[in-house]
Image (cartoon, rainbow, N blue to C red):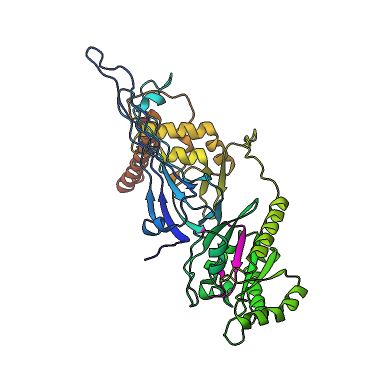
Amino acid sequence: MATFVDRVVLHLQAGDGGHGCVSIHREKFKPFGGPDGGNGGHGGSVSLVVDPQVTTLLDFHFHPHVKADNGKGGAGSNRDGANGQHLVLKVPNGTVVQTIDGTVLADMVGAGTTFEVARGGRGGRGNASLANAKRKAPGFAELGEPGDQLDIVLELKSVADVGLVGFPSAGKSSLISVISAAKPKIADYPFTTLVPNLGVVRMDNHTFTVADVPGLIPGAATGKGLGLEFLRHVERCAVLVHVIDSATLEPGRDPVADIDAIEAELAEYGAGLAERPRLVAVNKVDVPDGRDLAEIVRPDLEERGYQVFEISAATREGLKELTYAMAELVEAERKAAPPAEPTRIVIRPLAVDDDGFTITAEADGSFTVRGIRPERWVKQTNFDNDEAVGYLADRLARLGVEDKLAKAGAQPGDLVRIGEREFDWQPTLYAGVDFVPGNRGTDVRLEEKSNRLSAADRLAARKARRVRSADEVGADSSDDPDDIDDEDDAE
């Protein structure tokens, strides 16, 4: 069973907002006391927070589907629905949040760092909140807005000051076990370490973290031997230490060739690894042949500019000097790093002429309206209620959507898309004019439009009948179809 997971795919669903309530206050001797429908509660959001006690993404590996609570619907007597409970997911330090296509949404470093990844939907307003001086008793309420639904990828990249890199069985795990309190698995076969191990090193007044990165092999940068998964944990290290096996019995292996192979993989992987300061630790000098080989290759490595240390993790020879050198490089990198700027809230108000929406003429002759407010209003509209549809038309007209559609060249009957809805644009709806209240749940403007269309259909049908009748009785008919049609229409 997996015990360490550093990459998972999460399927997130924020909570939907609760629907608003349509209610009229009624009591004895007071049958119509005004609207008292409450608002729906907001849906719960899904957030990620860095917890130092969490070191793996294992929990999400077994539970990849995450859903926050929905908001409750409103009720009569001005009772608002309860908000859905927010869901907070704890992730390890160094977690990178990405979309499925690789777009980085957040890089979460530092305990307590929080990122809201899926926002809950707004609750719909009840008819009590929608009432005004002209619309005293609305017969509709807003629907709750759906919560965000998306898939994300979480990748864990170890956060450490020093990264130990090298071939399998070079002694990296042994080294971190003696310079820190880390207790990694140690054995005499390759790829004993399959997951990165972190250890905290304290040297006098210096404290830094060291990562034991699993062994790399040629081709690691292209994924060979799980190289991409291993190299990901080196990205954040400020200092790299080559741990070289000077007592290997494998043919074709020597310290210089090992360093060249690892450097080639680091350069191919990128992420700025080629520019990181380096140290070289030639390990296993407690073996006679290993010490001899270390003394032979040391001048060549120093000529390349490396600071070389001959060490033995078994006898702890040379570890003090190596640890001091690590601390010095870490302190130098920390001082060279730009100071962290305090978090500032930047307020960017909209321009005076910014309506908050755009209209795009599509190739098929349709028009698409994009904007936060129009799309949200459409989601919150109950299209089975004529009064709600008329209210939406009024809001869009006041926002300027009707005028911009006309200026963009839209003609009556053209297809208009707003969010996931499609409409046949009819500017003759008289949207935006003074509202004339009627029966609850109805809109007289929609009825007039329907009546006009019906009258036009009737007139066309009558004309067709008159023409057929005239053809049947002959050209000497004294009835003028157009005059009769006009009289019928006047009636």
Q: Quadrant of the C terminus?
A: top left
Look at 51% across and 40% down and name the residue there: 372
**Residue 480 visible in image:** no
State the predominant SS element of the stretch in magenta. loop
Query: Looking at the image, which residue sits at the far left?
Result: 28
> Splitting the image into 4 quarters, where does residue 281 fall?
bottom right
Relative horizontal placement of residue 365, taking residue 9 as reference (left or right): right
The picture places residue 467, in percent across and down from the top left corner, at: 35, 45
Look at 35% across and 45% down and name the residue there: 464
Looking at the picture, tell me which residue is in the foreground, 262 or 147.
262
The picture places residue 243, in percent across and down from the top left corner, at: 61, 71
Q: Is residue 42 magenta?
A: no
Relative horizontal placement of residue 259, taking residue 21 as reference (left or right): right
Residue range in magenta is: 156-172
The picture places residue 222, in percent across and down from the top left corner, at: 57, 73
Q: Quadrant of the N terminus?
A: bottom left
